Amino acid sequence: MTMGVSFEVEDGVARIGLDDGKVNVMSTAMLAEIGAAFDRAETEAEIVVLRSARPGIFSAGFDLKVFASGDAAKSLEMVRAGAELALRLMSFPHPTVGVMEGHAFPMGTFLLLACDVRLGARGPHRMGLNEVAIGIAPPSFAIELARSRLHPAWLSRTATLGEMYGPEEALTAGFLDRVVAPDAIDDALADTIAALRGIHRPSHTTAKKRLRQPAMDAMRTAIDRELTLAAYTASNRARSAVAMPG
């Protein structure tokens, strides 16, 4: 793995670490590295942990500079790479654990939503779908993914109003499964891994597909319908007006 993504396997657990030296922007290259790490995990491990090595940040989400550049082809390449990765995680054959210890802006939130178990540390960080606040409508694949995990009222608020939530609210909304103190996150992760070792993995894989097939079908349809060059070209003018953070 390169500087952006680390990979190690110990006792059947693959640990994929995010660290681009900044805020873990989900560029096309970063997404490809994460995908390559999951390729290895599929053959070399039995459980996968996805976690950031950057203090206070899980991921700043998609590279907004690509959206603001007005290059529809590059925007499409990046968003489609993120969509395909999230869809892959929805049916990944091994149990997956996402650990949120810092801000998770949309693509980071999408990856966490696609994990089987989402652990969060208490702190002054937020997660959610804030696209409308910066001049972008959430892509339909992301709405379908979020619909499969979030309570309806919270989904409406984050998708249409751009609300972001701290760990406790995220737990209530359905973004996270468990929230603990920062100094307890490693123990919580160890407990989670121990519990996952006790399940019958082939049954887990089958149950996951059966449960999530409607959401995955909806995501697949949304990707094929919406993430095309024609659609991005049509919205290129709007995307060039993305509100960059100060």
Image (spheres, rainbow, N blue to C red):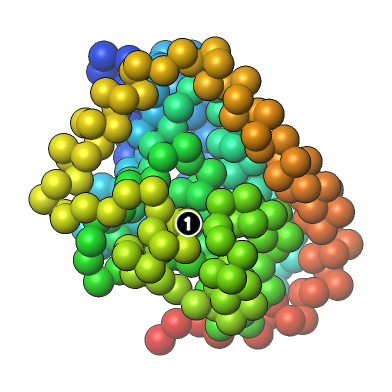
Percent coordinates x, y for residue 229 in the rendering: 83, 58
| Quadrant of image for the C terminus | bottom left
Residue 102 in the image: above or below residue 69: above
Percent coordinates x, y for residue 29 in the rendering: 52, 46
Q: Quadrant of residue 203?
A: top right
| Quadrant of image for the N terminus | top left
Which class describes the residues within 10 Å of circle 1: few (<14), some (14-19), or many (20+)? many
Residue 224 in the image: above or below residue 240: above
Q: 232 and 118: which one is in front?
A: 118
Total numbered badges shown on the rendered structure:
1
Percent coordinates x, y for residue 133 in the rendering: 56, 83
User: Is 220 displayed left or right of 176 in the figure?
Assistant: right
* Type of the residue with mark 1: Gly
Q: 18 and 199: which one is in front?
A: 199
Res 194 seen here:
yes
The residue drawn where x is 34% and y is 18% is 197
User: Is 234 displayed left or right of 89 in the figure?
Assistant: right
The residue drawn where x is 38% and y is 59% is 171
User: Is 133 displayed left or right of 200 in the figure?
Assistant: right
User: Is 171 displayed left or right of 204 in the figure?
Assistant: left
Residue picked out by circle 1:
174
The residue drawn where x is 65% and y is 28% is 209
Res 21 seen here:
no
The residue drawn where x is 46% and y is 13% is 200
